[in-house]
């Protein structure tokens, strides 16, 4: 079968910068994943930043580079296109892509847009394309198993969920909004308790989501931290399961009688392990290629991205 041709819009960290070296099964970026998939060739990239563009070309040995999307699409026949430009330029990217009949699949970075109206415009522009949105935890096999474990009550009945996060609602908290909706369906109630001053295009927000299973997920924004942080605790009638370091590790603490204070129970670490967090972009792109070939389905669709945008909009607009 003829190899598919891939292109990348935007040459920043997620495009290729996160991989200092590109090892098989350890991709953290679009470029490394394309290089590791035998059925696709990375043939072109574009970015208005000349320095970033030339560094990207040298690092990833891309034959053709362009300062704009329009120039790249005029000169290249691309089958799969990665949208790695900053979020505020996603709509512009899709406007350029929408009329190109060669492009069969699009792998777009999250969030889809900062503005819900822009997200809806993207949905309209991309209706003829196969689109995958990179809420990357959906391609982590360990988290797919965790979803099934919660459904089978392996860790008991969930009583409460607590999430701590930095970097804003749309940029960072939306990852775990997506995770929760993937696991349990869309929230049935939204309550906003505090909105912090806006930074750039995003807000930090404290809020609560109620799910049909009866539990509340409480999100707390951490505005003053000097590092990126996002962690989640699931409190159940059997103990606590913690999703640590952006989902890279899982720890399960079992509830048991405290021998020192027999009228109380305590949490004791039962197991802790690293999830299969590396190589999620490769799994996502391979899935996209299969869908282009008429097989399988997309784990995180354009509609999933829109749903996250709608929830974020409701959180920002909710009175508190």
Image (spheres, grey):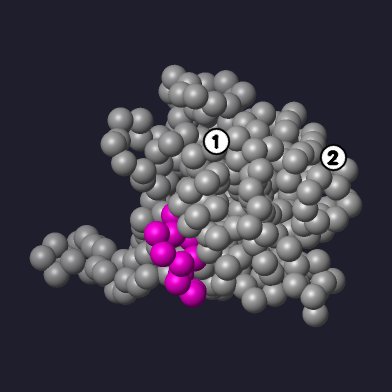
- Left or right: residue 260 compared with residue 227: left
Picture layout, residue 78 above or below residue 274: above
Which residue matches tag 1? 49
The residue furthest bottom is 1
Measure the alpha-carbon separation of dots 1 and 2: 29 Å
* Foreground of the two, 103 or 296: 103
- Left or right: residue 75 compared with residue 174: right
Disc 1, SS? loop
Q: Can residue 183 be seen by looking at this rendering?
A: no
Q: Which mark is residue 235?
A: none
- Tell me the quarter of the picture where residue 287 sits: bottom right
Residue 87 % position (x, y)? 60, 36
Residue 205 % position (x, y)? 47, 30
Q: Can residue 289 be seen by looking at this rendering?
A: yes
How many residues crowd around disc 2 within 10 Å: few (fewer than 14), some, or many (20 or more)?
few
Residue 195 % position (x, y)? 47, 24
Instruction: Name the residue: 77% across, 57% down.
Output: 78
* Foreground of the two, 162 or 174: 174
- Residues in magenta? 18-28
Tell me the mark number nearer the camera, choosing from 1 and 2: 1
In magenta stretch: residue 224? no
Which residue matches tag 2? 124
- Left or right: residue 15 compared with residue 259: right
């Amino acid at each position: 079968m003829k190899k598919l041709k891939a292109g990348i819009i935007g040459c920043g960290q997620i495009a290729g910068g996160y991989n200092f070296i590109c090892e098989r099964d350890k991709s953290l970026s679009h470029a490394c994943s394309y290089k590791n998939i035998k059925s696709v060739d990375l043939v072109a990239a574009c970015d208005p930043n000349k320095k970033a563009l030339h560094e990207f070309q040298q690092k990833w040995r891309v034959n053709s580079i362009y300062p704009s999307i329009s120039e790249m699409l005029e000169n290249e026949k691309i089958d799969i296109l990665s949208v790695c430009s900053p979020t505020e330029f996603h709509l512009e990217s899709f406007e350029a892509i929408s009329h190109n009949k060669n492009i069969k699949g699009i792998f777009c970075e999250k969030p889809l847009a900062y503005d819900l109206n822009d997200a809806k415009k993207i949905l309209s522009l991309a209706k003829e394309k196969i689109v995958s949105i990179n809420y990357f935890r959906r391609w982590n096999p360990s988290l797919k198993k965790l979803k099934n474990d919660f459904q089978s009550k392996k860790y008991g009945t969930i009583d409460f969920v607590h999430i701590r996060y930095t970097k804003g609602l749309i940029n960072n908290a939306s990852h775990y909004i997506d995770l929760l909706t993937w696991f349990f369906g869309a929230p049935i109630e939204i309550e906003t308790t505090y909105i912090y001053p806006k930074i750039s295009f995003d807000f930090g927000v404290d809020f609560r989501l109620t799910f049909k299973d009866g539990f509340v997920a409480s999100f707390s924004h951490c505005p003053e931290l000097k590092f990126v942080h996002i962690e989640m605790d699931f409190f159940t009638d059997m103990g606590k399961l913690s999703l640590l370091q952006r989902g890279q590790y899982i720890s399960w603490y079992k509830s048991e009688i405290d021998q020192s204070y027999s009228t109380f129970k305590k949490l004791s670490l039962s197991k802790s392990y690293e999830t299969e967090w590396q190589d999620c972009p490769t799994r996502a792109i391979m899935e996209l290629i299969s869908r282009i070939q008429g097989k399988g389905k997309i784990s995180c669709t354009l509609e999933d991205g829109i749903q996250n945008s709608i929830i974020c909009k409701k959180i920002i607009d909710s009175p508190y």
